Image: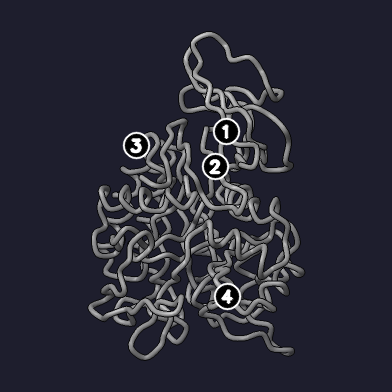
């Protein structure tokens, strides 16, 4: 028998924190054992400090770039893999490379590239997120107006065919759209094909959004951002996101995109399982870059923000480990709930909870090793170790 026995650290299983040892064999977590278990013959033993914590690897559903790479600029298999490598040092063991509004040929290339990358064992790529181009123009944020458009029959045909391509690798297709720009019948058509649909960049009314939820929309992308503010007579898409119980809202917990009071309000409204942490990360993540190019304009990295010359936010300057620590500090959740928001809840949202989001026998060995202040020491992806310093 070969494999690795992890011993000495505490273990957060995805539901609770216990004293246990973990046995990794191949790509899977073979067993959760009592602490101090004897290693089977041929199994290497890795002794960990008692102040460390083993937890399910983080899952990020919105990652535009990292390590100096922007998926929109290079919608290739190699770019998707490079972005995943850059985020792994921050505890993200699975992610969706995200392609924002752009030319149709770029969107199609990005989807095919992510499908290919998701077939690489241990890549960390578990699908693709297409954010746009079917958005409300006045709520597009930094998205290029030249490419914001309604969904054509050709678009719908292409999107309907994607889940089968990704399904071969048990990967997912997430589409963010504006419910006031895509009809409920079209949303139902995409959902029936296996596309996961989220609401975003929209001025949809409460009624329009709830009709989209009834049609199968199950998520909301970067809640409160690129949405009209809540109002007493027209709650709008943000109000619908808070009210729709069987939906999950992605939230950027950087203290910039959403005020801490609104973070706590969203948590109170949605309850456990209703919010998942996302980064909306851009190329500077994992680098010391102070700027990058998006749509031919310079995006500046300053004071914890990524902004255009006129101050428009263009993604976020945060990683998932920071998001977990911020959820504790800004939202008042405990460590276990913050970790669920980064792993179990996104796994459920993506219908991948049968293999990700928990430390459980038979699940993929995607694990993050955290020190006492929740700094990432390293990760295992499909059973393969990588030190965070590498």
Q: Which residue is mark 4?
A: 255
Dot 4: element:
loop
Say if 352 sits above or below 30 in the image.
below
Residue 209, given in percent of the width and then of the height, sits at: 62, 73
- Dot 3: what SS? loop
Residue for badge 2: 369
Do the residues under discs 3 and 1 have CB atoms within 8 angstroms? no
Let me know if residue 216 appears in the view. Answer: no
Disc 3 or disc 1, which is closer to the eye? 1
Figure check: 317 above or below 247: below
- Of mark 3 and mark 2, the one earlier in the sequence is 3
Q: Residue at x 60, y 68 (%)?
A: 212
Q: Earlier in the sequence, mark 4 or mark 1?
A: 1
Residue 289 position within the rendered picture, expressed as x and y whole percent measured from the top left:
30, 69
Residue 346 in sight in this render: yes
The first of marks 2 and 4 along the sequence is: 4
Badge 1 vs badge 2, beta-carbon distance below 8 Å:
yes
- Using the image as rendered, state which of residue 128 and residue 364 is in the foreground: 364
Instruction: Please indicate whether residue 25 sits to the left or right of residue 325 in the image.
Output: left
Q: Looking at the image, is mark 4 or mark 3 earlier in the sequence?
A: 3
Mark 1, residue position: 48
State if disc 4 and disc 2 touch (CB < 8 Å).
no
Circle 3/circle 2 CB separation < 8 Å: no
Q: Nearer the viewer, mark 1 or mark 2?
A: 1
Q: Earlier in the sequence, mark 3 or mark 1?
A: 1
Q: Nearer the viewer, mark 4 or mark 1?
A: 1
Q: Quadrant of the C terminus?
A: top left
Residue 198 placed where, x, y %? Answer: 54, 64
Q: Nearer the viewer, residue 123 or 190?
A: 123
Instruction: Identify residue for label 3.
Output: 120
Instruction: Specify the quadrant of the image occupied by residue 290.
Output: bottom left
Q: Looking at the image, which residue is at 55% across and 81% down? A: 227
């Amino acid at each position: 028998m070969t494999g690795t026995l992890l011993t000495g650290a505490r273990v957060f299983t995805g539901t609770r924190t216990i004293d246990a040892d973990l046995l990794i064999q191949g790509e899977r977590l073979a067993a959760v054992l009592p602490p101090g278990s004897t290693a089977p013959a041929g199994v290497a033993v890795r002794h960990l400090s008692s102040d460390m914590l083993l937890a399910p690897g983080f899952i990020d559903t919105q990652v535009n770039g990292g390590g100096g790479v922007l998926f929109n600029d290079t919608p290739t298999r190699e770019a998707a893999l490079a972005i995943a490598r850059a985020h792994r040092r921050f505890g993200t063991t699975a992610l969706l490379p995200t392609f924002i509004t752009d030319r149709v040929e770029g969107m199609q290339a990005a989807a095919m590239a992510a499908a290919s990358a998701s077939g690489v064992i241990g890549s960390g790529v578990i699908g693709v997120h297409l954010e746009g181009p079917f958005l409300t123009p006045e709520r597009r944020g930094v998205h290029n107006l030249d490419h914001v458009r309604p969904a054509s029959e050709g678009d719908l045909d292409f999107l309907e065919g994607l889940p089968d391509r990704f399904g071969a690798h048990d990967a997912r297709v997430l589409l963010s759209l504006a419910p006031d720009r895509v009809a409920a019948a079209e949303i139902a058509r995409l959902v029936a094909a296996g596309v996961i649909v989220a609401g975003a960049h929209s001025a949809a009314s409460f009624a329009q959004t709830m009709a989209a939820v009834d049609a199968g929309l199950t998520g909301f992308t970067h809640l409160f951002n690129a949405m009209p503010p809540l109002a007493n007579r027209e709650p709008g898409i943000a109000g619908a996101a808070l009210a729709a119980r069987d939906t999950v809202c992605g939230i950027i917990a950087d203290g910039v995109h959403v005020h801490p009071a609104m973070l706590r309000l969203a948590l109170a409204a949605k309850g456990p399982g209703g919010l998942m942490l996302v980064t909306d990360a851009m190329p500077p993540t994992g680098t010391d870059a102070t700027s990058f190019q998006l749509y031919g304009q310079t995006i500046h990295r300053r004071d914890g923000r990524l902004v255009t010359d006129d101050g428009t936010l263009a993604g976020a300057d945060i990683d998932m480990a920071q998001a977990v620590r911020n959820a504790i500090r800004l939202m008042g959740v405990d460590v276990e709930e913050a970790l669920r928001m980064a792993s179990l809840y996104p796994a459920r949202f993506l219908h991948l909870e049968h293999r990700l989001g928990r430390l459980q026998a038979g699940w993929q060995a995607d694990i993050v090793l955290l020190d006492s202040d929740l700094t990432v020491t390293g990760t295992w992806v499909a059973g393969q170790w990588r030190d965070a310093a590498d």
